[in-house]
Image (cartoon, helix red, strand yellow):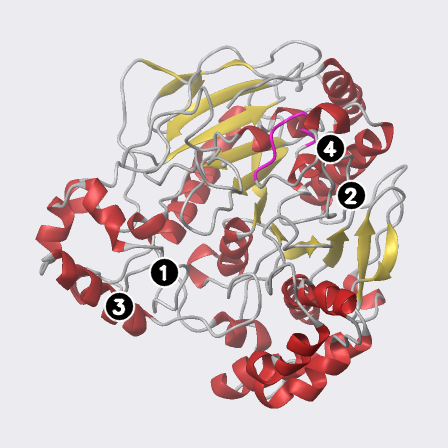
Amino acid sequence: MNAPRLRATAAALALAAGATALGGSPALGAGTAAMLQPVRTQQGMVQGTTGEAPGVTVFRGIPFAAAPVGELRFQPAAPPKAWTGVRDASKWGDTCIQPSGKTRPIGVNQALDMPDSPKASEDCLNLNVWTPARKAGAKLPVMVWFYGGAYAEGGGSMPFANGANLATKGVIIVSMNYRVGPFGFLSTPELTASSPHHASGNQALSDSIAALKWVKANIAAFGGDPNNVTIFGQSAGACITAALVGSPVAKGLFQKAISESGAWAGLTAAKMATREEMEKRSTEALDKLGVHSLAELQALPADQVAKLGRAQGIIVDGWIVPEDESITFAQGRQNKVAVLLGSNGNEGGSFGPPGGANVTAEAWKAGAAQRWKDLADLGLKAYPAATDAEAKAASSRPFTDGIAWFMHLYATDQAKVGQPAYLYQFVRTPASAPGKTNGGASHASELAYVFNNLDKPREVPDNSDPAVVSKSAPDIKLADQVSSYWTNFAKTGNPNGKGLPNWPQVTRMARNQAMLLDVDPHVGDTMTPEQVALYDALYDRDVAKPLGIAKWK
């Protein structure tokens, strides 16, 4: 979830935007690749290559941690090894081991299944840098990307997240690989006992922290400012960025955070799983494989490790995540960083209606008690359905609204600790492929606009046609606006800038509002007051009261 194919229209737009953003600075590229001389990192020299947009140099496949193999498998990321000579950084590094998606209905796995995808291996902890700087010392803002993929797939090489067009706006883009599936999220009692932190399970978070430490130590050599770093991610990557905002181990490694459709507990609000719960689950799965020790587990062939099943995801491990982060954020103990957060207008649109295509009004009402339990009356007030058509429409909304509500909670938590907090909902319905209808702004559909890569394949296919959208004037304009909001935020902590519709902070919006990102972005409603009341009650019942959080609104 690699094929750089910039269309002429998109390239011209990127060049124009880049010329404006770069402003003729002698430290930045001006029409030609700027940093083609070798760059010295703490581990050794690297040689980049011409990027996919004018004035941008790209360095691919730079190791930021040691290969997590042998005794390092399932361990926190270890420091990278040094090398001699000049390392060729023109090609992608290996992607992390994960399943192919060539035959699935929702589309291929872009980290693995594209014509020029890198091979997969456990030696995958590498990153990529797109820089418009000509030399060290430019002190450009840095944006570090964490991909989505349900904690089970993804890679820094996915074509939609090519950082070249964003880099033309005067920022450095870094994309990195973190371990996925059981390689990145696994807890066992022996792993925990062997840890100096008495923790296990968040290996992927340790990878993310290791990448940020590499950025802190090395990005100045690429023209970046190590003290102006923004982390950003979508879906599982959004959850990682939020978890890092809540983590004391990540303190000081970044100054701003962007989460797109996800926060610390997942896509919607819930209690976080604990290490003890996951240790029990992993032990049962390993027993079925006949594996009874850490040494046996570390010696297991990689394809056997993959049979452990889906990743457990981010957990309360007692170290990187010392407590359920709903407590952390409610009590103001999170890292004090500016945030830009949001979701999409029809998050489930690419996955089909949760109740199926033939939801009836009768079935919708009959299922209320199972769906919301003692809050069934509130649920039906939030999602009334007098007809079958209304029931079908209502059935697709809770997933979308649950994410939107959670992102609003995250934003207000940051505002309470005195940080700038900006909230959006992406609602653009782009042009559809011939013969298809588009259900609107579904999960991940904002990514083409964030990266200003309208011509690239979508991470989650949404029936939009990149060939059509990349030539559509309204979509070209919106992609320029959205990518400018994101890069402005990375520069200053404020997405606003010259020529952009004003985006107020979340404290100036109602609890059911956000900045609606569409043609002519503006503040508007994302849900009804009745829906807000439902999610308030659900959070209070399922998260706040069980965790002892007395005050959260």
What mark, if any, has residue 281 been given in the picture? 3
What mark, if any, has residue 435 been given in the picture? 4
x, y percent for residue 189: 19, 67
Q: Secondary structure at mark 2?
A: loop
Asked whether disc 2 touches disc 1, contact meaning CB atoms under 8 Å apart, the reply is: no
Asked whether disc 3 touches disc 1, contact meaning CB atoms under 8 Å apart, the reply is: yes
What mark, if any, has residue 429 been given in the picture? 2
| Sequence-first tag of 4 and 3 | 3
Reply above or below: 150 against 49.
below
Magenta stretch, overall SS: loop
Judged by depth in the image, the label closer to the viewer, 4 or 1, is: 4
- CA separation in Å, label 4 and label 1: 39 Å
Magenta span includes 453: yes
Crowd tier of the residue under label 3, counting other residues whose Cα lies within 10 Å: few below 14, some 14–19, many 20 or above: some
| Sequence-first tag of 2 and 1 | 1
Amino acid on which disc 2 is placed: Thr
Amino acid on which disc 3 is placed: Arg
Q: Which range of residues does the magenta coloring cover? A: 452-459
Crowd tier of the residue under label 2, counting other residues whose Cα lies within 10 Å: few below 14, some 14–19, many 20 or above: some
- CA separation in Å, label 2 and label 1: 33 Å
What mark, if any, has residue 312 been given in the picture? 1
Amino acid on which disc 1 is placed: Gln
x, y percent for residue 20: 81, 24
Can residue 492 be seen from the camera position used here? yes
Reply above or below: 433 against 55.
below
